[in-house]
Image: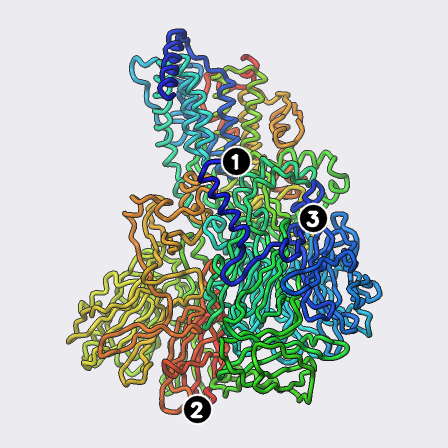
Amino acid sequence: MKIQIGIMAFAGLLLASCAKQATPIEISPEAYHASVDKVTEVMIHDIFSPPVASRVYVYPNIAAYEIMTLQNPEYHSLQGQLTDLGSIPAPAAGAAVNYRLAALVAHIDLSRRLIFSEDQVIAFRDSLYGNWDEQNREEFEASRDYGLQVADFIAGWMDKDNYKQTRTMSKFTVDTDDISRWQPTPPAYMEGIEPHWNKIRPFVIDSAAQFKPVPPPAFSLEPDSPFWKEVREVYDISQEITQKGDESEEVAIAQFWDCNPYVSVTRGHLMFATKKISPGAHWIGIAKIASRKTNSDFDKTLYAYTKTSVAIADAFISCWDEKYRSNLIRPETLINQYIDENWKPVLQTPPFPEYTSGHSVVSGAASTALASIFGDDFAFDDDTEVPYGLPVRSFHAFSQAASEAAISRMYGGIHYRAAVEVGVKQGRDLGKFVTENLQMTHANASMANDGAEN
Amino acid sequence: MNKSLYILFFLSLLSGCRQGGSLFDQPAGTKTGITFVNELQETEDLNILDYLYFYNGGGVAIGDINGDGLPDVFLSGNQVKNRLYLNKGQMEFEDISEQAGIGGNSSWNTGSVMADVNADGLLDIYVCAVVGINGFSGHNELFINNGDNTFTERAAEFGLDFDTYSSNAAFFDYDGDGDLDMYLLNHAVHSQDSYGRASLRFERNYETGDKLLRNDGGRFTEVSEVAGIYGGINGYGLGLAVSDFNQDGRPDLYIGNDFHEDDYFYLNNGDGTYSERLREYFGHTSRFSMGSDVADINNDGQPDMISLDMLPEEEVPLKTSEGDDNIQTQRMRTEEYGYYYQFTRNMLYVNQPDGRFMETALMSGVAATDWSWSALFADYNLDGFQDLFISNGIPKRPNDLDFVRFISNEQISSKMDNTRLVDQKALEMMPSGNVHNYVFEGGADLLFTDRSGDWITRDTLLSGATAWGDLDNDGDLDLVINNLNREASVLVNQSQGKGDFLKVALRYSPANTYGIGTKAFAYANGGVQSRELFPVRGFQASSQPILHFGFPAGTQVDSLVVVWPDNRYQVVRNPGLNQTLQLEPVQTQPFDYGRLRPGATPWFRRSKDDMGLDFVHREDNYTDFNREKLLPYSQADHGPALAVGDLNGDGSEDLYLGGAKRIPARVYLQREGRFIASGIPALLNDSIPENTAALMGDFDANGLADLLVANGGSDYFGDSDYLNNQCYFQSGAGFNAQPLPGQPANTSVLAAADFDQDGDTDLFVGNQTLTGDFGARPDSYLLENQGGQWAISKALDGRALGMVTDAIWTDFNADGTPDLIVVGEWMAPRFLANREGSFREVAMELPSGLWQAIAPFDMDGDGDTDYALGNWGTNSKFTASPEAPMHVYLSDFDENGSRDPVVATKRNGAYYPLVGLDELASQMPMLRKKYPRYLDFAGQTIEQIFGAEALQGAEILNVTELRSGYLKNQGGRFEFVPFPIALQVAPILEFLSGDFDGNGVPELLAAGNYFGVKPYQGRLDAFPGALIKNENEILLGNRVGLDFTNKSIRHLALVRLGQAPYLLAVFNDAPAALYELVKTK
């Protein structure tokens, strides 16, 4: 029996190899989207916090981008532009490298290293590998080997970004004696996440504190103080929109931009989590939408993802630097204690200090990066959240989407106005700095029409 | 069918015939006639998501409803009709439900209890119901016994037709007016989204709040509010225990609440009101409190209690289930939100002479019985010790971590969010929790031995409410268990003849026919056994209303003292055994409860205002667990330091009390027999370090006392100046600080002696840890006094001496020179013999422990010096023995440049880490990649987790002994002898020998308790201290006037105020206390 199968398989193999002619492997932008989507999917499963998620996106994109620039003179290498990034190794002489294929291999491999549930990425990879191997073994193997070599190189650079060290640094110590300080919030009362994220090596900005925002309004419980007015405003807005009902535009906006990777729900002894993509992932999704809408080729798609993810990564470093500097208490804690003990925000309060709003900073930075590629005046239908049961929302400009994402945090009852307004400015300033300092294309300085030309 | 399958089939047939274990036979319903099945119908509209207590099951009540002497069985079903089974004898029952009319009309029935509510001498049946949520209709039903095997539902007439969220009820005479009142246990359904303030319990809510109902001539009146019974929206009442806990003749209550709401301990004030006083009497409680039971388990005449929780015993469910809070969440819940200390495991509370409860579940072996519902103590095997049955099982584990984190999302989240429904498929993703029931054999020393799988078979039933009764009247107690979706179990006890029994059936009064509240004390062989008749016990059930005693075969009972509910008693002399005594009050006398609590002359009395000593030690906010995430216990809470001496040269003793980090020390000078806080700037200004030890002495021989202060705290690290120990030399001009030589470390002990016999005082400096490197053995030092200058002496090689906690100078080899004994953690005591000014270690075969303290004391009265040793005790999750030592693996597993300590204990032949994946991965993120699912991690041994290679590179420290005890001096050789079990309930941290009664013979005082552990360990709070006269005479602190329970000692000292000696006790993060020595007066 076994022998029979063996012979048949062998014969089949022979037949296949005789019948097929090796053809050049084409790598479409869709193949890259699929790889990015896979990373997003695994990250949702594995539960990565927003700052860590930004890191998972950015390094694989950079590895892929660097390979692509070797072949496409339109794009500049980031070597020397990103902190401590050297030149990736050149492929072996005479190797029949398909650069897009190698870029995709590098993206998959680095992503695999960065997430937890490797088996999911490996299954995705092996299916692709099988197809490519069948289509053109020589080209596949050369490209794969090179892609993995670059992945190794980028991993070496990545490993020096202080991520490992920050894993084992001390947990955030809650100061329950000081009411102005952040405290864990209901329902899970999770510990403050990533208190040392400002020690992660930044990419373009010179330090985590480069875009240090103005301090939040001075903490005060005095009714007439600017701070307390902001607390009150969160409560009033929430009461107002709750009255309008779940169908109100404000609630829709809040929920659309929730982007909380882990919302815990408890019913008696039954616990479960509602998981969504992170704020960074949402903007990675918008990068995909914009690339598709402009029919961007593989290289430009990669350019868009890379630039956006670099801006997002630096935005998180900058924002988290401020969060654990000001260490400000969330509206939920104060409102429950001083205004309404039964009040619950529309969105679940995420587990880290309030100021500035992470989504606002990231949206400001990502939208600026995208505008520099596709022009800000860019209409799109954002269907990123459809898989999570949310509707499509339409925007006429990236900056408009960013402004909406920012204000959504007030509607959601998880941020004061200052965190949102100062936060989105912090993000835009940072995004501007990133786009002005990164020379990724020839026409980098005036990007407004770049997208349209494609 | 092939042969092996056939055999298997045959075997399974066989086992089907022969159910049960060696003690309990388990006949099927086809034999007994009890075929009741509590069939649960999960629907889209009604399931565990819609109703949090969907799996809590029905009730069971046992009692003789027709007066034929055979106890009958009532079972209530959640959705199915109730059933009543008439006992026909020979373990055969007849279903008379239809005729009896007890089927019930509520949609969702819960607990059921029997009591003679209308005082006509017949047992009635009260069935609780959940009404008003999920479309549940109906009300609690009271089936009044018509005396002809029929019943009439008359709850409304009696005012007991509550349409609330009831789980159980108990009838007893709370106000002492002779009739039966009722406590109704209700449960909240309040969203679990936030804790809310603990003060929510002060508000009242009809549906969820518990109720106390006073019987006013057959009509029940709610008196909850005036009686001081909480009725809020956050009481998830599942446990209901009635007992005269404090033995003042008035029934008290313990209410077990699920989730974050505290349990309630109501003491009966005797004026129709209760006072809730949990915090005064309990150090901590179960967290997800379920069923409970009260019984005198140690035969001391006082009621003890178990409160059940849901901690799994087996590794896999243990490591895949959501466990205790992390330390910061716990801190927030207790300090910010006002809740008490609660931990996820069963709690066994042992009643103490001062009325407080010593919690011993871990030590007693009953802490982890998984998802447990009912606990029933009784002497099942008739040996004179109460045994323990625990019913167990949950169809689906909703707190499974993989389900919570990974599966629930894809499967159910959106559906649940949008429709609030959960489908069958989602439920199937949760692992089953159909763990077997547990039965434990009770014994001496509070120890329970697991007999599951022997006395009973390891079933896969989902068992809930359980009741006992002697169904076959053979003298041993049988059990009836209400199961989910399976036939109710009848466990028939086969102990008849293996021991003796005495059953007591009471006829008390017209209004309380069965004598609920009666106590009985059986005296035999110089001991006592006690019982109380409160038939509602366990969970949603009532047992047969009789008192049942077991005795070893051949026991002669001298007397049976029966104390009736009116607190009058009678004595039955030499009652014959193996019979049922029918008793009614005859020639009763007033009972003096004082005789139950043995009178003891107090040795110590807290002195008024502590003679001016208003010292309160406050620990600083530093949490070393946040930085060193795998620390097995804290190193940051070793203060305060204490030194006693004549600081100002006026001939009276003064005190130095060191402060925690950035908190100034305090100096108290003695003036006219009182302590006055005094400012000595040079001493108090050095407030930055954390002071951990101190010592006074005239080290420079200038006639003025100098002060040594050692520092630690485990926050400062490396060469930090704030770790330097200081010597404050006193001169006419004041104090002048000089750092002591030696590498900085967290210092634990300073011990002075003139080791080189040159007339001055030399010093041993014992160091415990290096900050950030738990397990490292820092250098300790012998400092030689060279004319008032300290110099490191080469006479003793203190390099890597160990994690030193204590040291004493003592001439253990009786050669006239002071030798040194050093004790510490993860090491054996080390004997360093002083041979002409140079130290050599004397090899001793002594166990490695977590030694905390050592003191010389002649324990066995043979004239030589033995050494008392304080250790960790056996009442924690640490376990260790020579055969199964506890390990700490020290290695830089995550390659971040510093070593991580991983503590592992041996279970079933293999080592498992004590902590779960979340905690390990918080230090070693690579484990997340290795174990994407909790199920992959659960059940993994330490070898599997880290790999043999990594472990080979690890340093391993061992502990083979956790018990405190003493080193018995046998002609210069020493043998470890453990203290009795009562001294193993918590770490012993301090000894003080002294003549506390002024009889010229010294005693040894031991004190302890420790709270610097993570919530999975709980709080090691149970030790009341002990006064040790000798190895055979030990008095616990709560019998000699000491208030040490639930406080963590750091120092004991005898100080003289004026001419009178006082005991000074200094605690961590608490006020110091000064006691008069009563007996010396």
Q: Which mark is residue A45?
A: 1
Residue on which disc 2 sits: B1080
Query: How far is mark 2 from mark 1, CA to CA?
Result: 70 Å
Q: Please determine if labels 3 and 2 lie on a single subunit.
A: no
Q: Amino acid at mark 2?
A: Thr
Front-most of residues A289 and B448:
B448
Residues under numbered marks 3 and 2 in contact, where contact means CB atoms less than 8 Å apart: no
Q: Which of the 4 image quarters holds residue B663?
A: bottom left
Q: Please determine if labels 3 and 1 lie on a single subunit.
A: yes
Classify mark 3: residues with Cα within 10 Å, few (<14), some (14-19) or many (20+): some
Task: Say which label, 3 or 1, has the lower sequence index.
Answer: 1
The chain ID associated with circle 2 is B
Query: How far is mark 3 from mark 2, CA to CA?
Result: 65 Å
Residue B695 on image: x %, y %: 34, 75
Classify mark 2: residues with Cα within 10 Å, few (<14), some (14-19) or many (20+): some
The chain ID associated with circle 3 is A
Residue on which disc 3 sits: A232
State the residue at coordinates (46%, 41%).
Answer: A198
Q: Amino acid at mark 3?
A: Arg
Front-most of residues B489 and B568:
B489
User: Left or right: B405 with respect to B983?
Assistant: right
Front-most of residues B841 and A186:
B841
